[in-house]
């Protein structure tokens, strides 16, 4: 009588993943966990308090153990990783650290996800104490890891250049979109009534208000070009380091009638906003991936992005990629309209590489590589 082989025990460290507070890295790891083959691995996710309620879909297919705190204190989290997590991971064949760092006390073998090296490119956007921490811990963690998982070829090359890591130890684990994305999206009419949006076309920027995300740039474009074209700019996303500067600019007399700054909205409203938008704009200076770009592709909305970092790699021929020049963006909405069907056809082709299943399989390959 044949028996199925035992599953390989994997512990995934998500203690850093405070729901709603860490940007696209949260969705990146969550979607991988939803797409990873369940027949081979027995996964235990260690996460902060509140993770299960934020991600019941993950808890529905994997064991999730929450710590007794919410993960917002870095010193507390660092301590827990070397104590509580270390104890919990006993007996695991591999530990996957999803937040870019490996604790002082750790088990081997390890897979380390590095989302990006923004702190090296734009240190001025990182608080001094966090910058000092990253400069010390990230290089050490990269050297300790058996395998490093990164979201794009762009990030892979930056890790090689920064830390001298053997390319054969780095696996590209692309972002993935779940097939159910947008199924619960809020209806356009409901969104217009709920947020007093009127009847005109909208352009959407979905991002935390961090300085590198480009909110102030797109507000300049809005003021100089797009306001006269009769569009309304909608900003959604949690507060970041540039929150006050963005809020002050939005409240100016030249923009307060054509810009809606809504903060963080529900997933249903976010998907609804993407679906109803004339275009999703992503004028970021630096991204390790840029998940909203492929979310827009999946929901049938053209993308206008910057030509920085990984974005040309991710967007490909499925959107309009432009330098961060205000006048270059001035006619972008007209170009999007004229090429809409072309971009949407290209999006459908590119999305075949960006499913949750493909992302999960790539992560499984990284696990197998580390277990050799």
Image (cartoon, helix red, strand yellow):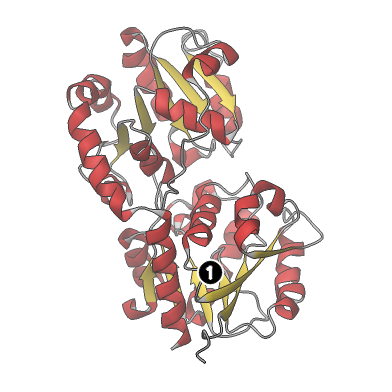
Image spot of residue 315 (x, y percent): 28, 44
Query: Is 60 on the left or on the right of 283, as rendered?
Result: right
Residue 219 position (above or below residue 81):
above
Report crowding for label 1: few under 14, some 14 to 19, many 20 or more residues within 10 A (C-alpha): some
* Residue appearing at x 37%, y 30% in the figure: 280
Q: Nearer the viewer, residue 56 or 231?
A: 56
* Residue appearing at x 55%, y 22% in the figure: 261
Identify the residue at the far bottom of this view: 1
Image spot of residue 344 (x, y percent): 25, 34
Q: Quadrant of the C terminus?
A: bottom left
Image spot of residue 141 (x, y percent): 54, 75
Which residue is disc 1 drawn over? 138
User: Helix or strand or loop: what does disc 1 sit on?
Assistant: helix
Query: Is 92 on the left or on the right of 65, as rendered?
Result: left
Any part of residue 151 in sight: no
Identify the residue at the far right of this view: 68
* Residue appearing at x 55%, y 65% in the figure: 98
Image spot of residue 296 (x, y percent): 37, 36
Residue 322 position (above or below residue 169):
above
* Residue appearing at x 47%, y 60% in the figure: 35
């Amino acid at each position: 009588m044949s028996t199925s082989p035992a599953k390989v025990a994997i512990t995934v460290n998500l203690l850093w993943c405070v729901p709603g507070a860490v940007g696209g890295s949260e969705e990146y790891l969550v979607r991988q966990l939803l797409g990873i083959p369940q027949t081979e691995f027995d996964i235990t996710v260690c996460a902060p308090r509140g993770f299960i309620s934020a991600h019941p879909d993950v808890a529905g297919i994997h064991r999730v153990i929450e710590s007794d705190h919410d993960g917002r204190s870095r010193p507390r989290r660092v301590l827990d990783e070397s104590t509580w997590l270390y104890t919990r991971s006993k007996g695991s064949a591999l530990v996957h650290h999803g937040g870019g760092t490996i604790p002082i006390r750790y088990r081997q073998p390890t897979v380390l996800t590095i989302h990006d090296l923004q702190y090296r490119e734009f240190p001025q956007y990182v608080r001094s104490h966090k910058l000092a921490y990253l400069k010390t811990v990230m290089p050490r963690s990269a050297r300790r890891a058996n395998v490093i998982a990164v979201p794009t070829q762009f990030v892979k090359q930056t890790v090689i250049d920064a830390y001298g890591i053997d390319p054969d130890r780095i696996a590209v684990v692309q972002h993935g979109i779940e097939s159910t994305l947008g199924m619960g999206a809020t209806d356009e009419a409901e969104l217009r009534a709920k947020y007093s949006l009127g009847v005109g076309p909208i352009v959407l920027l979905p991002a935390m208000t961090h300085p590198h995300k480009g909110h102030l740039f797109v507000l300049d474009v809005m003021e100089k070009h797009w306001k006269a074209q009769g569009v309304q700019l909608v900003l959604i996303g949690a507060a970041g380091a540039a929150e006050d500067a963005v809020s002050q600019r939005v409240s100016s007399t030249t923009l307060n009638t054509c810009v809606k700054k809504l903060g963080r909205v529900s997933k249903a409203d976010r998907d609804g906003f993407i679906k109803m938008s004339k275009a999703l704009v992503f004028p970021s200076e630096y991204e390790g991936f840029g998940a909203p770009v492929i979310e827009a592709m999946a929901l049938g909305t053209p993308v206008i992005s910057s030509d920085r970092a990984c974005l040309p790699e991710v967007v490909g021929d499925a959107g309009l990629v432009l330098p961060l020049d205000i006048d270059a963006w001035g006619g972008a909405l007209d170009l999007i309209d004229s090429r809409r069907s072309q971009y949407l056809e290209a999006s459908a082709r590119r999305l075949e590489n960006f499913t949750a299943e493909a992302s999960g399989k790539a992560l499984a390959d990284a696990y197998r590589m580390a277990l050799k």
